[in-house]
Image (cartoon, rainbow, N blue to C red):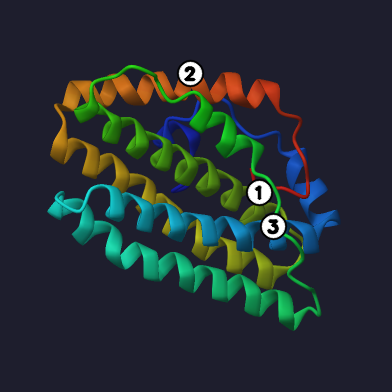
Amino acid sequence: MSTADNSILGLKMPTDPRWVDLASISLEEILTDHAFCEQKAATQCISLIQKYPDRIDLVNALSPIVTEEWGHFRMVWAEMKKRGYELGKQRKDDYVNLLIQNEPKGVPGEEKLLHKLMICALIEARSCERFRLLSEGLEEEALRKFYYKFMISEAGHYRMFIDLAEKYYDEQKVRDAWKLWLQIETKVLEQLTPRGDRMH
């Protein structure tokens, strides 16, 4: 069973397999979007460290992830340069923005971190699933191997955010929050039209 199998990740709505065909047609666009996703992932980890500097386990866990995500950006950028692609402008990530808009309002202050960790875990899980599709569906073998490495990495990040949540919150509370976010993500995806020029 694949590391990114939806039954392992818990995702309720699988990506339409035809998304890979769209992505392969828009390779420069999908690589550009991927590059910016890696930048944003590094920035999000920095933001969490800045917001929760007293959470030592969080600081210890996320510090190396910042370096790793920026390294991923450099890998994608190197791949783009090799192909003669330009980075282009950063684009809006409707998927991530809609998830953030659904962050529960009025929750106790001590529970806000739980939902932030769930959002991060969800983004990593969905990215992992999309990378799996690219690693299996692209025609070019080098790119399939390229995305297989990213798939493995994102699976580890997804697990790390869940593990972090379980350090700070009761296991049942984390499980319930994860179920809530899986439902929210399904509604978010129903609002979006799959695009081959976007990673999410």
Question: From this viewpoint, which residue is outermost toward the bottom?
Answer: 82
The residue pinned by badge 1 equals 199
Q: Secondary structure at mark 2?
A: helix
Image position of 61 (left or right of 30): left
Name the foreground residue: 51 vs 140.
51
Closer mark to the observer between disc 3 and disc 1: 3
Q: Which mark is residue 90?
A: 3
Q: Residue at x 67, y 76 (%)?
A: 79
> Is residue 1 visible to the viewer in this orientation of the structure?
no
The quarter in which the N terminus is drawn is top left
Mark 3 and mark 2 lie on one chain; the one further toward the N terminus is 3
Q: How many marks?
A: 3
The residue pinned by badge 2 equals 183
The quadrant holding residue 90 is bottom right
Amino acid type of the residue that numbered disc 2 sits on in the rendered structure: Gln
Give x and y (percent) for residue 196. Answer: 78, 46
Name the foreground residue: 167 vs 20.
167
Give x and y (percent) for residue 24. Answer: 80, 56
Name the foreground residue: 63 vs 146.
63
Image position of 39 (left or right of 134): left
Give x and y (percent) for residue 130. Answer: 60, 46
Closer mark to the observer between disc 3 and disc 2: 3
Amino acid type of the residue that numbered disc 1 sits on in the rendered structure: Met
User: How far is mark 2 from mark 1, CA to CA?
Assistant: 20 Å
